[in-house]
Image: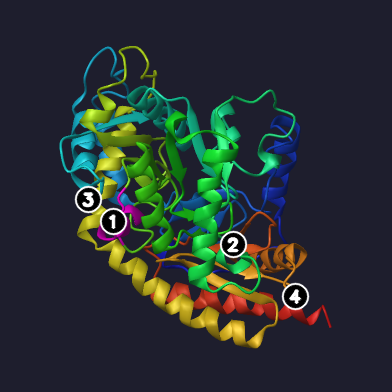
């Protein structure tokens, strides 16, 4: 079966069939949506992709965090087929369907929110839509206009979500942008001001957040603070425990809602169902949780989960959409969560993390260019730097291209493009994990040797 295969490159990349499709893509698809890798998928299973030329790749990107249970899980395929035999679509604003209700009930039961009272969930089509609706819900519930986000943040490419996103490349030339979005400094401890201890650095970043109330928006006008528990595009930077606890207190003291954007971190990637499970243990759980990506194993679905007290303050007509909570997507999501819980994929995430972290730390001692290794669970990043600790994005680009030529798909991240992220499906086998680490290390060897 394909899911058990090892990488095998039979042709120069792209192969002839892939090149023909990629050339057609250049003529038919927006140039702004670049093709990152020289392959065209034919089929995928588990953590493995076969392209149209018969080349086989290990995929450590997983649709950028979408495929925690892997490609084409047979039980999800069967659940979607069964649903398709009955109906594809029922718009929830017009007619109820059982899958929407059952999935909302499931997310309500597992969401680690601050409030243990009744919870409610709404569904949309994507992470960006979920972000936008979370903002609408927070503003409706608080009767306040402003939102605080962070340096390095990525929340999507729709207009409001792009405004909340830090990196200018994601909305260059798209102004005027929506008002009411203010930015604080995220606790990027590796690049904290020189000479500070971790404790001092955390205190520094807390002060930087509090300064937003003085310099940008008084606290009484702030509806919510929105945080990625581990920044994704920002460089796989985890929010430190002490900082999260401080933010929770700031929110409580000022009547501000705390929103966790778990779009990329959710569904067992961190070693728990959500990073917010850790936050709950730290007495710092969020008021609202945003999810998408691995929620439905590749079908389009996003969700906002919060307390009934918060969600029911939204006026009728404000929430909804034609395809939100599509029946096929809900069927996939229900089965996905069942598989994650039954197969203990959160535990598997920690096993993968332990093996990778052990290997990455060995590499850090061997290569001058590995500056930092970080993350939570198997959402890990390696930051590559020059000898003066300046970002080394050109090395990262070279490593990625060398790896794919040998059958391993990896991707960059970070505000400087100098981080390689690890988002392998959690169903990867031990043998595939070892092979991927071997290819990865060889790619570093080849690219570092060219620097000499």
Please say if 441 is above or below 154. Answer: below
Of tags 1 and 2, the one toward the viewer is 1
**Residue 277 image label:** 1
Q: Residue at x 52, y 68 (%)?
A: 200
Of tags 3 and 1, the one toward the viewer is 1
Q: Residue at x 47, y 77 (%)?
A: 357
Other residues around mark 3 within 10 Å, as few (<14) / some (14–19) / many (≥20): some
CA separation, marks 2 and 4?
15 Å
Range of residues picked out in magenta: 272-285
Q: Where does the image place residue 365, in percent across and percent down from the top left? A: 61, 87
Q: Residue at x 28, y 56 (%)?
A: 277
- Look at the image and tell me in which quarter the N terminus lies: bottom left
Q: Which residue does the numbered mark 3 point to in the structure image?
A: 338
Q: Is residue 296 visible?
A: no
Which of disc 1 and disc 3 is earlier in sequence? 1
CA separation, marks 3 and 1?
18 Å
Q: Which residue does the numbered mark 2 point to in the structure image?
A: 410
**Residue 4 image label:** none
Q: Which residue does the numbered mark 4 point to in the structure image?
A: 447
Q: Are marks 2 and 4 in contact (CB under 8 Å)?
A: no
Which of disc 2 and disc 1 is earlier in sequence? 1
Which of disc 4 and disc 2 is earlier in sequence? 2
């Amino acid at each position: 079966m394909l899911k058990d295969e090892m990488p095998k490159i039979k042709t120069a990349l792209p192969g002839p069939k892939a090149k023909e499709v990629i050339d057609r893509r250049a003529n038919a698809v927006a140039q702004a949506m670049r093709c990152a890798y020289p392959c065209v998928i034919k089929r995928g299973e588990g953590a493995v992709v076969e392209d149209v030329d018969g080349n086989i790749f290990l995929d450590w990107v997983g649709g950028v965090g979408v495929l925690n249970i892997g490609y084409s899980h047979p039980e999800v395929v069967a659940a979607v087929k069964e649903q398709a035999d009955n109906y594809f679509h029922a718009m929830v604003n017009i007619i109820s369907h059982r899958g929407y209700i059952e999935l909302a009930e499931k997310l309500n039961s597992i969401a680690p929110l601050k409030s243990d009272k009744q919870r409610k969930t709404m569904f949309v089509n994507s992470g960006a839509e979920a972000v936008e609706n979370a903002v609408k819900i927070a503003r409706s519930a608080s009767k306040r206009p402003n939102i605080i986000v962070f340096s390095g943040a990525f929340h999507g490419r729709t207009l409001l979500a792009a405004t909340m996103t830090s990196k200018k490349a994601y909305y260059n030339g798209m102004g005027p942008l929506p008002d009411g979005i203010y930015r604080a400094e995220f606790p990027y401890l590796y690049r904290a001001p020189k000479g500070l201890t971790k404790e001092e650095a955390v205190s520094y970043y807390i002060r930087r957040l509090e300064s937003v109330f003085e310099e940008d928006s008084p606290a009484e006008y702030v509806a919510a603070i929105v945080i990625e528990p581990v920044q994704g595009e920002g460089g796989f930077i985890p929010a430190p425990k002490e900082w999260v606890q401080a933010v929770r207190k700031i929110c409580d003291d000022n009547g501000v809602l705390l929103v966790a954007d778990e779009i990329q971190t959710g569904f067992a990637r961190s070693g728990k169902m959500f990073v917010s499970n850790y936050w709950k243990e730290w007495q710092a759980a969020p008021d609202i949780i945003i999810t998408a990506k691995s929620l439905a194993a590749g079908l389009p679905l996003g969700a906002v989960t919060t307390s009934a007290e918060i969600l029911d303050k939204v006026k009728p007509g404000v929430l909804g959409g034609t395809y939100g909570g599509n029946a096929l997507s809900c069927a996939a999501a229900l089965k996905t969560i069942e598989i994650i819980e039954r197969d203990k994929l959160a535990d598997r995430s920690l096993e993968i993390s332990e093996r990778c972290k052990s290997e990455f730390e060995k590499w850090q001692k061997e290569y001058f260019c590995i500056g930092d290794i970080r993350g939570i669970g198997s959402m890990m990043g390696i930051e590559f730097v020059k000898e003066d600790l300046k970002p080394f994005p050109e090395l990262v680009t070279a490593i990625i291209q060398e790896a794919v030529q040998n059958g391993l798909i990896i991707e960059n991240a970070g505000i400087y493009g100098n981080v390689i992220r690890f988002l392998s499906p959690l169903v990867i086998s031990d043998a595939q994990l070892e092979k991927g680490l071997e290819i990865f290390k060889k790619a570093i060897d080849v690219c570092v040797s060219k620097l000499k």
